[in-house]
Amino acid sequence: MMRRLQNRIVMKTLVSAFLMALLPAFAAVAGPAEEGKRYAMVPTAVIYPGQIIGSGQVKRVEVTNPDFAGDFATDFGQVEGMITKSTLIPDRAISISSLREPFAVTHGQQVRLLYNNGSLQITALGMPLQDGSIGELIRVRNADSGLTVSGTILSPGIVQVVSK
């Protein structure tokens, strides 16, 4: 009786080890079918222009139409925290071109201007004349001199002045 119980335990262990060894092979076979699926992000309610998209306002759905094409968002990372440029309708795919990054600098909000030329570094306060996101070139009025300069937005509230 004891011997039979030991044999069963050994057999179960061997079968478990065999199945565990097959698991990566099964996952490799099952993987491509899962990768073949396409997904799109859709709003769960109307989202109006200028609104920031939160994770509770969108869901990910499987695309079943083989002819569906375009620059649509496929996961939460592409839409969460973005701002809409146009009205988004529930259950319709969200186009990447209908979204933009939040502004890092807004018109009339004081910013720090940085100017570098070799070893010379100058900082000043300025007022943006337009809104902009990181990496964009905008016009800014120097608060001390009143001179209008162009600069690239480095981070929220900081503009690197470009020299001519």
Image (spheres, rainbow, N blue to C red):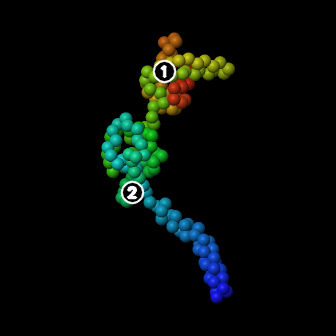
Q: Report the quarter where the N terminus lies.
A: bottom right
Q: Nearer the viewer, residue 8 or 123?
A: 8
36 left or right, relative to 49 = right
- The structure residue drawn at horizontal position 53% and vertical position 25%, both measured from the top left corner, is 159
Q: In which image quadrant can residue 13 be found?
A: bottom right
75 left or right, relative to 45 = right
Residue 48: % across, % down: 33, 38
Residue 110 numbered mark, or none = 1
Decide if residue 159 is in sight here. Answer: yes
Q: CA distance from mark 2 to mark 1?
A: 45 Å
| Secondary structure of residue under mark 1 | loop
Q: Report the quarter where the C terminus lies.
A: top right
| Secondary structure of residue under mark 2 | strand
Decide if residue 99 is in sight here. Answer: no
Q: In which image quadrant can residue 20 be found?
A: bottom right
- The structure residue drawn at horizontal position 51% and vertical position 11%, both measured from the top left corner, is 145
Reading the image, the residue beneath label 2 is 63
